[in-house]
Image (cartoon, rainbow, N blue to C red):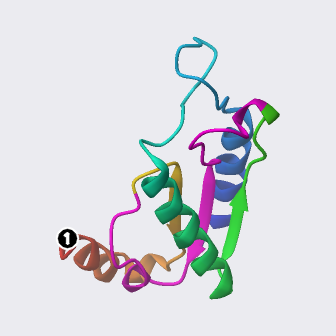
Amino acid sequence: DDVAERTLEMLTGAMKELAIGNPDRLSADFGPVIDVEAKRGIDTHVATMREKGRKVTQMPMADSCGAGTFVPPTLIEIDSLDELKREVFGPVLHVIRYRRSQLDKLLEQIRAT
């Protein structure tokens, strides 16, 4: 909690700098996800988190990414690690705010995954 706002500000600033595009371009930081099924799974996860009222920040993508299996860089603020039932393999970062006194408990939860 002590550094959450500043950290989120830095993360979203860094996300704005990312270039999404065809991986054959040296200017692209990352390309599409592996296939349509992977994109659908990530999109469904993001939509579910939004429906749960989680704050979701996504960066806009260039028009050139309209076709294909591109997923925009996404940051999702969650309340607990228990909200994640599976790995989300894509440009998605989940952030949990915690109090310094809760760090040991959070680390136990992470080790148990």
The residue at the point 33 percent across, 72 percent down is: 86
In the depicted structure, whether residue 27 falls above or below residue 78: above
Q: Is mark 1 on a helix, strand or loop?
A: helix
Task: Name the magenta segment's main secondary structure.
Answer: loop
Seen from the viewer's position, the closer of residues 46 and 1 is: 46
Amino acid type of disc 1? Arg
| The image quarter in which residue 30 lies | top right
- Answer yes or no: is residue 13 visible: yes
Q: Is residue 18 left or right of residue 92?
A: right
The part of the chain drawn in magenta is: 64-88
Which residue is painted at 30% across and 83% down in the image?
105
Splitting the image into 4 quarters, where does residue 8 fall? bottom right
Is the C terminus in the top left, top right, bottom left or bottom right quadrant?
A: bottom left
Instruction: Give the side of residue 84 with respect to residue 73, left or right.
Output: left
Return the residue at label 1.
111
Figure check: 85 above or below 12: below
The x, y position of residue 54, in whole percent, is 65, 80
Nearer to the camera, 91 or 47:
47
Which residue is nearer to you in this view: 32 or 28?
A: 32
Query: In the displayed structure, would residue 51 be above or below residue 20?
Result: below
